[in-house]
Amino acid sequence: MAKKEETAEPQQEKVRYSDEELQEFKQIILEKLAKARADYDMLKGVVDHSSSNDTEDTSPTFKVLEEGASALSKEESGQLAARQYKFIQSLEAALIRIENKTYGICRETGKLIPKERLRIVPHATLSIEAKNDKNK
């Protein structure tokens, strides 16, 4: 009888991050979410005038000079607030993926997104490879 050789099976590729890894990502996301919400509230305040020392509380002389700049500033702040709101929604969706244990899986390739990318862009749903293919 021939001796059966023991062959080391190739290590299976991870299909998801461990619960400990997911908790690490959750902390990163919660910190970014707190800052994003604070930034959003500040931008919203600029647009709504709720926390403003704008030209409206200065003399009419300055009002004429600053109306154009004020309108532009409000428009820019509105656009920034909209982008910030979208960012908040993306972070909240990432938290849901953590709870579902699907966080960090590329929606195009089905492979794990590298940790380095997720630490920088914690709401990412595409690997760099998939993102580059999409942009071509």
Image (cartoon, rainbow, N blue to C red):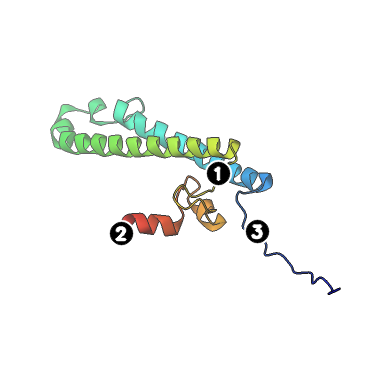
Say which of marks 3 and 2 sits in front. Answer: 3
Q: Nearer the viewer, residue 2 or 99?
A: 2
**Badge 1: residue crowd in 10 Å (few <14, some 14–19, many ≥20):** many
Badge 1 marks a residue whose secondary structure is loop
Residue 125 image offset from top left, x and y in percent: 46, 47
Q: CA distance from mark 1 to mark 3?
A: 19 Å
Give the farthest residue toward the front. 1
Horizontal arrangement in the rendering, residue 84 relative to residue 95 (left or right)? left
Badge 2 marks a residue whose secondary structure is loop
Q: Nearer the viewer, residue 42 or 6?
A: 6
The residue that disc 1 covers is 103
The residue that disc 3 covers is 12
Give the farthest residue toward the bottom. 2
Relative to 7, residue 17 above or below:
above
Residue 19 image offset from top left, x and y in percent: 67, 44
What amino acid type should be assigned to the residue bearing mark 3?
Gln
Relative to 100, residue 133 above or below:
below
Identify which residue is drawn at 67% across, 65% down: 10
Horizontal arrangement in the rendering, residue 25 relative to residue 55 (left or right)? right
Residue 136's label in the rendered image is 2
Horizontal arrangement in the rendering, residue 123 relative to residue 13 (left or right)? left
Q: Earlier in the sequence, mark 3 or mark 2?
A: 3
